[in-house]
Amino acid sequence: MLPLAGVKVIEFCQVAAGPFCGMLLADLGADVVKVEPPEGDMLRQWPPISNGYSENFASLNRNKRSVALDLKNPEHKKIAQALIRSADVVVENNRPGVMDRLGLGYAAFRDEKPGLVYCSISAFGQSGPRSGEGGFDVTVQAVSGIMSVTGEPGGAPVKCGVPVSDFAAGLYGAFAIAAKLREVQMGGPGGHIDVSMLGASLGIAALQTSEFFGTGRDPKKLGSAHPRNAPYQAFKAKDGHFVIAAGNDKLWQAVTEVVKRPDLLADARFKTTSLRAQNQVALKDILEAEFALHPVDHWVAAFEKAGVPLGRINAYSQVLADPQVAHMGWVQPMTLPSGVATRTFGFPVRLDGQTLPLRRDPPALGGDTAAVAAELAGKKAAAE
């Protein structure tokens, strides 16, 4: 029995933020019915394509069922309305106003179904001067300030390599839905949850916004460095790069011992964590002169022995093969509707020491339309 077993979710979402939200709920046991247009979620066209099926789409739509509906078709719209009436939760990530114009918005069901939890995910929110604007992850990373602190000092704007604005919005959505379901369970009302990618992106930037509020200055790009800790970044060794994070005086002393530079402890520029952060460019130059003498493996072994937190700069092929990932059981086998056997990274949170299993492979487009229609017909007959 999973935590959200018995919860029915109808998802009207495409691409990333909404589907990720829906998948998190599905991973935790909810019955998620994904409503797609006849041509399918556009993510189905994203490579890599394995025998006609997108692995990108599969990565965000496991544990779901798919119903294909043309929401401009009156008969299909009736099915969508019936699905919403049968649900505990609705998740949608259209532009504000689209679901209302289709007769599928929260207002159309609020009085009829007061316990409904309805979550709308959009770029800027359901109201306000920018609510009508669309947005994608890269545009929201730009607007939200993320790109202003990403990359090397003086370098061109770059986005985070992972679509953090999309996925942060999905996480906030799933968290808020779970909280609202608890309120409904306790006898409270449902409601309309308004998740914006902009708000989610600012929410996970707490250290950056607090720096601005506290100083009146904009945070700056620091590459892999940290504004308040040093040495705490990527360093170049003889044959590559690695990261150390020596965020306190004890760890700093261990670093000086590993590089055999006890004189650095007496250097006035590096006496405290704050001073090391202020002088981290000079500190980096000094340390990299030592690191250049040996390859990455040498320094990894030395810092591990000294108890200094560190990390190799892994490619995904390397981290997915890490023994810890294997121990946690995060990589799971999955079969695509095209028959291709592949793998997916599953739900990363363990419950009572157990990794949640993949219960349902990703769906074929509209593959569950007949079964879901039969369920709705059965409920209608039972109600009569």
Image (cartoon, helix red, strand yellow):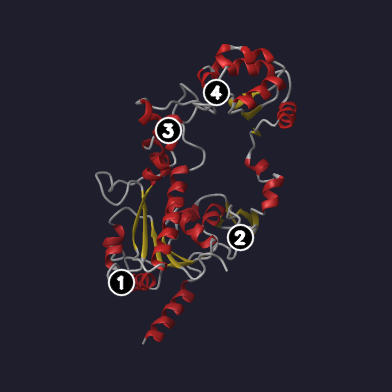
Q: Is residue 38 above or below residue 240?
A: below
Provide residue 370's location: percent of width, then percent of height. Answer: 47, 75
Give the CA separation, mark 4 to mark 2.
41 Å
In this rendering, position of residue 133 left or right of residue 248: left
| Residue at the spot 66% in from the left edge and 46% down from the top edge | 320
Answer few, some or many: residues within 10 Å of disc 4's Cα (few below 14, many 20 plus, some between 14 and 19). some
Question: Is 192 in front, or is 228?
Answer: 228
> Label 3 neighbourhood size at 10 Å, few (<14), some (14-19), many (20+)?
some
Closer to the camera: disc 4 or disc 1? 4
Label count reads 4
**Percent from the top left, x then y, of residue 127?**
26, 50
Query: 250 or 285, which is in the foreground?
Result: 250
Q: Hey, which quadrant is residue 208 in on the image?
A: top left
| Circle 4 residue | 273
- Asked whether residue 341 is in view, the answer is no
Between the residue at mark 4 and the residue at mark 1, the CA separation in whole angstroms equals 65 Å
Residue 81 visible in the shown view: yes
Image position of 252 (left or right of 117): right
Q: Which label belongs to residue 208? A: 3
Kind of residue at disc 2: Leu
Identified by mark 4, the residue type is Thr
Residue position marked by numbered label 1 in the rendering: 74
> For the residues carrying marks 1 and 3, which lies nearer the camera in this image?
3
Secondary structure beneath label 2: loop
Q: Residue furthest left?
A: 129
Q: Amino acid at mark 1?
A: Pro
Identify the image quadrant of the N terminus.
bottom right
Mark 1 is surrounded, within 10 Å at the Cα level, by few (under 14), some (14 to 19) or many (20 or more) other residues, namely: few
Give the residue at x 56% y 12%.
Answer: 268
